[in-house]
Image (spheres, helix red, strand yellow):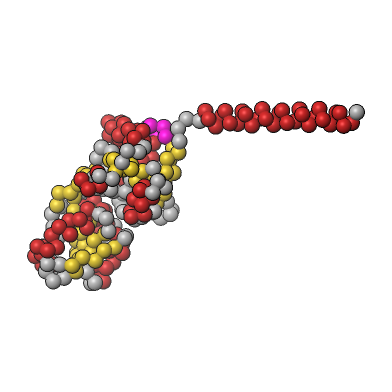
Amino acid sequence: MFKKISSVLLAMLLLVTLVGCGSKTDSAEGESGKKYIIATDTTFAPFEFKNDQDEYVGVDIELLKAIAEDQGFEYELQPLGFDAAVTALETNQADAVIAGMSITDERKEKYDFSEPYYDSGVVMAIKADNDDIKSYEDLRGKKVAAKTGTEGATFAESIKEKYGFEISYFDESPNMYEDVKTGNTVACFEDYPVMGYGISQNNGLKMVTDMEKGSSYGFAVLKGKNAELLEKFNAGLKNVKESGKYDEIVNTYIRTE
């Protein structure tokens, strides 16, 4: 009798367990959307950087948050550095990249871009107390600094033969700035909003050229993949611009005067 009762109880317990597991599975399948992995740079202020509370902030960070809230999707932000972020995208370790990434014809061969969310350009900057470098002509026979994979590096490469200078490459903007301040290089090429923010934060540099027209920034996914995420980004971008949220975000980090 004891064995018979035990068998009945065991059967009832198994049934309850299976029902519970079925409910859990049904609930999981009913959850809307997926969580996207979004890779970004680590130090590209004012678009992404750490604040005093060790939190990532900036135009890209705040804009992505606003768009995700508007479109109702979840994401996990992975600050990896620009080169590593692009590698993560190309190896399917990330669904998208937002990192002040310039939209260029060369990149369009590998990535699908959103509508532009910021129009940028390139400037040349030197040490604040340097009065010798006033134009590109003054760079002949000298070394300049550029950040790998950026619009600034592309522009420097396009004029180096004409003006006869060498380029030293850096993975992070702060390291590039320090190289100029220590005199290892006499100037650096940087995106205008990035340099403008840096100078406002007393980075020890000054601009000596007008902004060269550059490419716009875009949100990127691997070509032919994550079309639904790209559509959500574009729709959200349109909405946050119309609501005034976009201007609020940009004006927090980038000032022209």
210 w.r.t. 164: above or below: above
Is residue 70 covered in magenta? Answer: yes
Across and down, in percent, residue 65 comes to 38, 40
User: Which quarter of the image is occupied by the N terminus?
Assistant: top right
Left or right: 36 as drawn, with respect to 108: right
Could you tell me how many numbered marks the image carries? 0
92 w.r.t. 23: above or below: below
Q: Quadrant of residue 245?
A: top left
> Can residue 15 be seen in the rendering of this structure?
yes
Across and down, in percent, residue 217 comes to 25, 45
> Can residue 253 be seen in the rendering of this structure?
no
Residue at the far right in the pictured view: 1
Between 121 and 201, the residue placed more toward the observer is 121
Q: Residue at x 29, y 59 (%)?
A: 173
Q: Quadrant of residue 23?
A: top right
Q: Magenta part mainly helix, strand or loop?
A: helix
250 w.r.t. 166: above or below: above
Between 74 and 60, the residue placed more toward the observer is 74
Is residue 97 covered in magenta? Answer: no
Across and down, in percent, residue 152 comes to 21, 56
Q: Quadrant of residue 227?
A: top left
Q: Residue at x 39, y 36 (%)?
A: 68
Left or right: 215 as drawn, with respect to 248: left
What's drawn in magenta, residue-wise?
Answer: 69-73
Q: Residue at x 24, y 40 (%)?
A: 116
61 w.r.t. 209: above or below: above
Across and down, in percent, residue 208 comes to 14, 60
Between 80 and 127, the residue placed more toward the observer is 80
Left or right: 25 as drawn, with respect to 228: right
Q: Residue at x 38, y 32 (%)?
A: 71
